[in-house]
Amino acid sequence: MASEHFVTMQFSTLVGIILLLIIILSILSRAIKVVKEWERIIVLRLGKYVGTKGPGLVFLVPFIDKGLIVDMRLTTVDVPRQEVITKDNVTVSVDAVVYYRVVDPEAAVLKVRDYNYAIALLAQTVLRDIVGQSELDDLLTKREEINKKLQRIIDEITDPWGIKVTMVTIKSVELPEGLVRAMAKQAEAERLRRARIIEAEAEREAAKILAEAAKIYEEHPVALRLRELQTYIDIAKEKNMIIVTESLGLSNVGKTAAVASAISKRGGERS
């Protein structure tokens, strides 16, 4: 009987020790926090802010202190697509991405309830405002300026929250289908206009050169005749054409032959 009572006491003691260990481990798990390098922990003691700690091992008073972990790494917020009417009354769909990070954990926790959600809503509002104040051409050609303007406005508003907005980027701008077709026609017309201008400039340059050549031929008729003969030579290479020319007097033929002979002799002397 005594042995059974002793065994019962030992079992009760073992159960008590196990329960005590569980309680101690539970308390230690609440009291000891491991804060990573990119994190900080906001310590609230009985609801009052007492400091920011970390990284490393942080001890909290059980059941009195409460720790809130804040991530200090760069975070992105995807701004959903927004239907906006531009300054020149064109409906466009715009979406963007906001890049930010926490620089003051105390302000990020104490001054705004949920800074991630607040930044997401703020980015949507500012995006709609800026796009609504811009014309379509500026939205398509000056996107870098609009990105910097968005970043500056959002950063100024979130600065008291301990948030630094590093970059805002508009991902895409979607236009109505009818407007896309109209812009394609406009671009095609612009390319056709440039092609016609280039062709006209080429014609003008060619006309100037031909006018200069005509003056030279007018001053030197023999040069025109030699050019004509050279053209006949080029045509004769085909060997499948019959050339009919006007008859020339013997005097003209003689003059032409004499000039050709003189040119050939002069070339031989020079060589």
Image: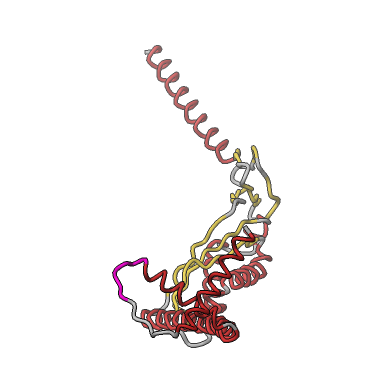
User: Where's residue 248, x and y in %?
Assistant: 43, 84
| Residue 263 inside the magenta-drawn segment | no
Quarter of the image where one finds residue 55: top right
Residue pictured at 30% horizontal, 73% vertical? 241
Say which quadrant the N terminus sits in.
Answer: top left
Residue pictured at 44% horizontal, 26% vertical? 15
User: Where's residue 130, x and y in %?
Assistant: 57, 78
**Furthest-right residue in this view:** 51
Residue pictured at 44% horizontal, 24% vertical? 12
User: Where's residue 189, x and y in %?
Assistant: 43, 83
Reply above or below: 120 against 125.
above
**Furthest-left residue in this view:** 240
Range of magenta residues: 237-242
Q: How is the image coloured?
A: secondary structure
Residue 19 appears left or right of 236: right
Q: How many marks?
A: 0
Quarter of the image where one finds residue 10: top left
| Residue 239 inside the magenta-drawn segment | yes
Reply above or below: 152 against 136.
above
User: Where's residue 75, x and y in %?
Assistant: 56, 55
Reply above or below: 129 against 150.
below
Question: Which residue is nearer to you in this view: 237 or 69?
Answer: 237
- From the image, give the main secondary structure of the stretch colored magenta: loop
Question: Which residue is nearer to you in this view: 38 or 115?
Answer: 38
Question: Which residue is nearer to you in this view: 82 or 61?
Answer: 82
Q: Is residue 134 visible?
A: no
Say which quadrant the C terminus sits in.
Answer: bottom right
Q: Is residue 175 visible?
A: yes
Question: Which residue is nearer to you in this view: 102 or 32?
Answer: 102
